[in-house]
Image: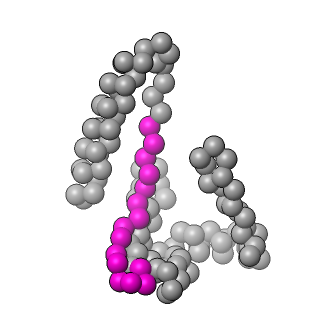
């Protein structure tokens, strides 16, 4: 296998050298038809219905069908870092609970279309 992956501090980093031009690689990573052609394996899952909008705020998602027929949607992870709570644990805890609610509201709105 040529791909390498390593996890440091909860971050996945992966890389591979591909014997192709940067333009070809970019097209394979951004064109919905190209993505559906190679992302997945019939013994595990196949992807389809790719939505690729590379602009800031754009949508990047796909649907997947497992070898057992189970379907799922892959979307975008949103992570918020809100700092400035040194020596204010109670405020940080309340703010954390608030962000949970805000992110749920955002997900409901965005997923509804």
User: Which region is colored magenta?
Assistant: 66-80
Q: Quadrant of the N terminus?
A: bottom right
Whether residue 58 is visible, yes or no, is: yes
Q: Does 17 sit above or below residue 69?
A: above
Across and down, in percent, residue 42 comes to 49, 87
Residue visible at 45% across and 42% down in the picture: 79
Q: Which of 22 and 91 is in front in this view?
A: 91
Q: Nearer the viewer, residue 27 or 45?
A: 45
Identify the image's colour scheme: rainbow, by chain, secondary structure or one colour. Answer: one colour
Q: In which quarter of the image is the C terminus?
A: bottom left
| Residue situated furthest top in the rendering | 87
Residue 17 position by quadrant: bottom right
Q: Which of 91 and 26 is in front in this view?
A: 91
Q: Is residue 71 magenta?
A: yes
Q: Does 24 sit above or below residue 90?
A: below
Residue visible at 36% across and 18% down in the picture: 91
Name the magenta segment's main secondary structure. Answer: loop
Whether residue 48 is visible, yes or no, is: no
Residue 16 position by quadrant: bottom right
Residue visible at 43% across and 55% down in the picture: 76
Across and down, in percent, residue 59 comes to 40, 59
């Amino acid at each position: 296998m040529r791909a390498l992956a390593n996890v440091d501090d909860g971050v996945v980093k992966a890389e591979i050298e591909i014997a192709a031009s940067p333009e070809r690689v970019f097209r394979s990573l951004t064109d919905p038809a190209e993505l559906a052609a190679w992302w997945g394996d019939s013994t595990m899952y196949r992807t389809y219905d790719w939505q690729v909008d590379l602009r800031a705020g754009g949508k990047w998602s796909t649907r997947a069908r497992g070898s057992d027929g189970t379907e799922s949607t892959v979307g975008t992870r949103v992570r918020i870092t809100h700092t400035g709570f040194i020596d204010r644990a109670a405020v940080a805890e309340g703010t954390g609970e608030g962000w949970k609610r805000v992110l749920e509201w955002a997900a409901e709105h965005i997923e509804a279309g």
